[in-house]
Image (cartoon, rainbow, N blue to C red):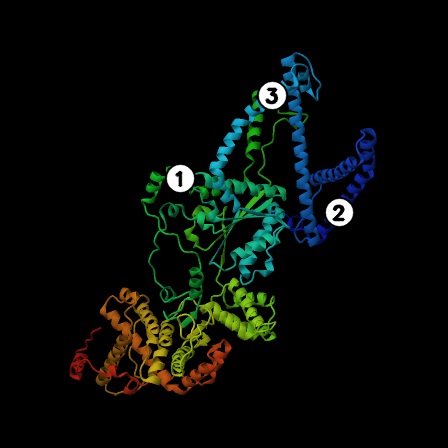
Amino acid sequence: MSVPSSSSVGPASRSDSDALALAWRRLGRAATAVALLTSPAFFLTLVVVNDWPIWVAVLVTLFAIAAFRGLVDLICHRLIERPSLYNASERTKAEDVVFRRRRWYWRTRFRRLVLYAFIALVALLLAQLFVRLLLGTGAPFFTPLSAFNEVFPEEQRVQLALQNSLIFFQLPLLFFVNFMIFFGPLLMFGVMQMKAYEPGESDWGVRLEDVRGQADSKQEVERVITLWAAGEEFKKAGGKPERGLLLIGAPGTGKTMLSKAIATSFNSPIMTMPGSGFAQTFIGLDVVMVMILIARARRLARKWGGTCMIFIDEIDAVGMRRNALAGGYGESSPGVRRTEDVLFFGDWGDITPTGDLRLETAAWRERIFAQRAEAERALRDERQPRIMRMMFPGMGGGMALNQLLVQMDGMDNPPVLKKFFTKKWNTFLDAMYIVPGSIFGRSLRRKPPRPRAEQVYFIGATNVPLNALDPALVRPGRMGRHIFFRTPTKDDRQDVFDLYLGKVAHDPDLDRPERRDEIARITGGYSPAMIEQVCSMALTYAHSDGRNAFHWDDLIEAMTTIEAGTASGFEYIPDELRAVAIHEAGHAVASHVYMDGVLSTRLSVKARGASGGHHQAIETEERLIRFRHEQVARIVWALGAMAAERVFYGENSQGVGGDLHAATTEAALMVGQWGMGAEPVDLNGHGPADPTERAELEWQIGRRFERVGREIMNRSSAEVGDTLSTPAKVRQAAQILGQAYITAYCLIAHNREAVAEVADAMVSRIEIHGDEVVRLLDSVGLEAPEIDLTDDAIWPKAALVEDEPPSVIRARLQRGSTED
């Protein structure tokens, strides 16, 4: 097709819209002036000619003036174009809302007036016919029943009237009452969940500018909604707006907040409905709920110029795959697991069961937000439908999705009644043969009805994967535009903090860009609602201390309370406090030296929840994959605390149990899932020069790694048993653990004074956050040691005990065979 020039198609400029709006204002003023000038004559006619009371005449005259203005608006709306809402000023938009209200009001009144007049005329004609047939005489046209006054006494007339009215109303009334008693309560609870909001009456205090952290998604939604609200130019250019919009994302990512902003910001009505509201007891009632929803939306669309939006929250409650709804959810297919799929404990996804290690990654955030979603519905037993049919025959639902799909497809269809009358009328005229097709160029046939002028668009929100929804629902033409909401990244969180910190009194130090970046870095896993709660709670702490603005310490205390609960008040004895500090310092030092692209964000020895201490870090860049050396670094991080305890105390405490669980699981996944075996022993230039003796020493060191790994391996994890299914894999995992532990031990031993300095800072500060943690670790001068595997001093005593005589080892090496 040819493409019109840009001047004939594109959105009107603001100057054009303002000029047309000004012309409408002048027209309205002129119509008001005409009505006022002619109103005295109308008033005198009522008072002088008809002898009406003055106060009644005044009220009727005022009503007539308003009715005349309404009639002028209706006629002018048919003949004159309204200002476009593209690039329109706020005044023009406000006037547009008022104009639509007036037009809807008077159009309804005039239509009802014509209908009532027609009904009255038909009733009078029928009464005349009835009197003439019954009495054989005529009667006054406007009071035909007065002729019965001469035939029946007054008492008999009253009795007959009561009997006829009872007979006429009794049966339909009883049927309606019975229906409402039985089905009314069932439908009432569903209808009560439908909320309709018209422009100007819904304000949650949320504007589009308040939706932060999802810039790309918000821009895409805003683009689609703008076309829905005022997209006539787009349609004239040949475009077809999407019928539905699907918002997909984890709970707390801003989907519902964005819908509130849409209802507040756009000059179009919106209806909201939870997906669970369609669930009904009896078959067919869920279909009725859908039809009621669509009917109310169409009515609002007619009232407000042709557009209404329906927002269905948690649409997965009605839009799941129909085979899943019939037989329950299927089990997910097995696949390669990530570390975050296995090592994820507590509400905040700690790596260890004890809750003292946490690393923010993209996969970790996805799990955090998915965990906050509602629990999945249980699988339905295959015998449940038969039991239900036996106990309650005919009950059930599940047809709401089908009806919703039908309604989406039928939005562009012509009205049913218009199609019916057009077909009947044209068929009748054609069947008469003598009726021509047209007279003087005027067609006697009704034109084919056009599609409905009003349009209803759908917005759905869900936190389930796209492939879990019915394909018929998410295909193009229905909810074909899919917009994904990611879990808030560091930059997203900083954007949200910029919003909420601007609303509460706070220390100016928190406005520094470095401080804002630090705040966003240490709030991994926070949703926008949680960020708002943190700001409010920090202000609460400040006010409780008699301050009007909160400081950095108040913010930290609020964050820690939300994550781990209020501090338990437990006080360590001095020796135990230092032991916990040494433990956490081991984690922090190992992370700082060996984990590239990771920054520590929190270091604490305050007992909260089930954790005695805590070390938290964040990846500085979003990562989707990790290489082997990065996985080994995570194991070194986990084992750093055990190594620190053994360096400082010569033994370890019970507190390393969670660390060993995490390290063992990581090693098991490396060997069993990701094909990452142990590295060959590298003596780094140490050891004998003779090849045979060197090979013998390398084999012995490999066995030492294995013995160390077996000693610290935590076999209570189900992952270890499932993944390490052969002795060879167990040996490989044990060697990885041994290599990681020796690396961590050498690091702590080489930087003993630095680790002690970090521990001392923790003892004195109790909790350290953000940049302070990084500055502390940078200031102590940590460095990676050069490890000499031939030095027996770095090995635990158990590792030095050979399980085979050297002669046997030498013979095996000479034969060129190995156990592996």
- Residue tagged by mark 1? 395
The N terminus: image quadrant: top right
For image coordinates 45% across by 38% down, the residue present is 284
The one nearer the camera, 307 or 47, is: 47
The one nearer the camera, 195 or 800, is: 195
Q: On residue 9, which mark appears?
A: none
Where disc 3 sits, the SS reads helix
Identity, as a three-letter code, of the amino acid under mark 3:
Gln
Can you tell which quarter of the image residue 114 is in? top right
Q: Is residue 535 left or right of residue 735?
A: right
Where disc 2 sits, the SS reads helix
Distance Cα–Cα, label 2 vs label 3: 58 Å
The one nearer the camera, 440 or 83, is: 83
Q: Is residue 651 left or right of residue 591?
A: left
Q: Residues within 10 Å of mark 1 (few under 14, many from 20)?
A: some
Is label 2 in contact with label 3 (beta carbons under 8 Å)? Answer: no
